[in-house]
Image (cartoon, rainbow, N blue to C red):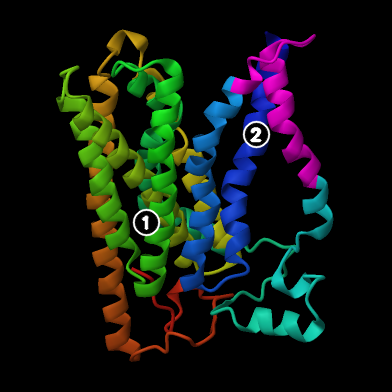
Amino acid sequence: MAGLVACRSLLGIFEAAFGAGAPYFLSLFYQRRELGKRVSLLLGMSPLANCFASTLAYGITHIRGSLEPWRLLFLIEGAPTILFSIVVYFWLADSPGTAKFLSEEEQTQAVERLQTVDRTAKSKVKWSQITAGLTDYQNYVHSLIHFCCNYSFAGLSNFLPTIVRDMGYSSVNAQGLTAPAYFTSFLCCVLAAYISDKYGKRGYVISVFAAMGAIGYLLLAIVQDETKTGIRYAGVWLAACGVFPALSINITWLLNNQGGDSKKGAGLALLATFGQTSSFASSALFPSTDGPFYVRGCAVGCGFTGLIVFLALGLHFKLEHENKKRDRLYGKADENARIDVTLGGDKEANFRYLT
């Protein structure tokens, strides 16, 4: 048991670094209004993978051999990640300016097209930016939104097949019925990213999809009739299609409005550390004794997802007010102008927040 706990702890440590690091990495390559599609494609892989993971796991666990099925499951699903790490180490660029697959001229263009410039050496940390990140109210709002999203995200990933099964379906059919909802939620991630990148209204997009998720959880919590599986199944779809897009756009929004690379890192560290703790709650609030309706877990999911609507709208209007204030003080800013955020960060006079 001790060895199993140690391995699981190491898995959590390394996975945590990827969860915060991958969106941060993408922010080094793309303009602010290009980032939503990239982060959503990255995080949208989670519901997309869930479409196939259950079927794959079902097939692997029925393999009869010298190893226990659960050991085979870890080996077969983990091997591609380990093998691909070799490719990543040698071929994934650290930044646009060091990408080996670009010519020197293309490297220069890739760096100059970015809208914010941080002249801090890439191998160094700027502590003033980290302090700014840890004291910026925006990052705490984003962390609270992520906390609420992650409760529903973890609850869906862990318990959605169980919720569908307890509607009266077999385990195999329940796995199959979750796949369309997961796939549609991936498409919603792409749609949310397209809209928010085009119009720059991240807060509105998050609040719309969070409201959809809240309605889904509300249906699951209040419809306690085993004959109304259609309504409950619609709740499953709404919950899945609302939560995943809200989570991905929230991370994009945080990255968009940080002045400097070190501040991005501090903001993401806050979000990943505090935001992930709600997974503990979701694992405890869907006990088998609450089946077949799981009212308590779904009601909490409805409350948390509904709270996201107010947090996102509140932050949207606060940042919109700040932009108008800077317009009055310093004049309108060119949206495509390059801004040096090395010293002033997002407090620079020409910096405008995406709302």
Magenta residue check for 155:
no
Left or right: residue 147 versus residue 259 is left
- Residue at 65%, 16% (x, y): give it: 5
> Which residue lies under the disc numbered 1?
137
Give the residues in magenta: 59-85
Label 2 and label 1: CA atoms lie apart by 27 Å
Using the image, determine if residue 300 lies above or below residue 322. Answer: above
Q: Earlier in the sequence, mark 2 or mark 1?
A: 2
Secondary structure predominantly adopted by residues drawn in magenta: helix
Label 2 crowd bin: few (<14), some (14–19), many (20+), radius 10 Å: few
Using the image, determine if residue 268 lies above or below residue 170. Answer: below
Label 1 crowd bin: few (<14), some (14–19), many (20+), radius 10 Å: few
Residue 346 position in % (x across, y down): 46, 72
Residue 328 position in % (x across, y down): 27, 87
- Residue at 45%, 39% (x, y): give it: 274
> Which residue lies under the disc numbered 2?
13
Q: Nearer the viewer, mark 2 or mark 1?
A: 2
- Residue at 48%, 56% (x, y): give it: 40
Residue 11 position in % (x across, y down): 67, 30
Left or right: residue 143 versus residue 97 is left
Left or right: residue 108 versus residue 28 is right
Foreground of the two, 238 or 314 = 238
Left or right: residue 284 versus residue 97 is left
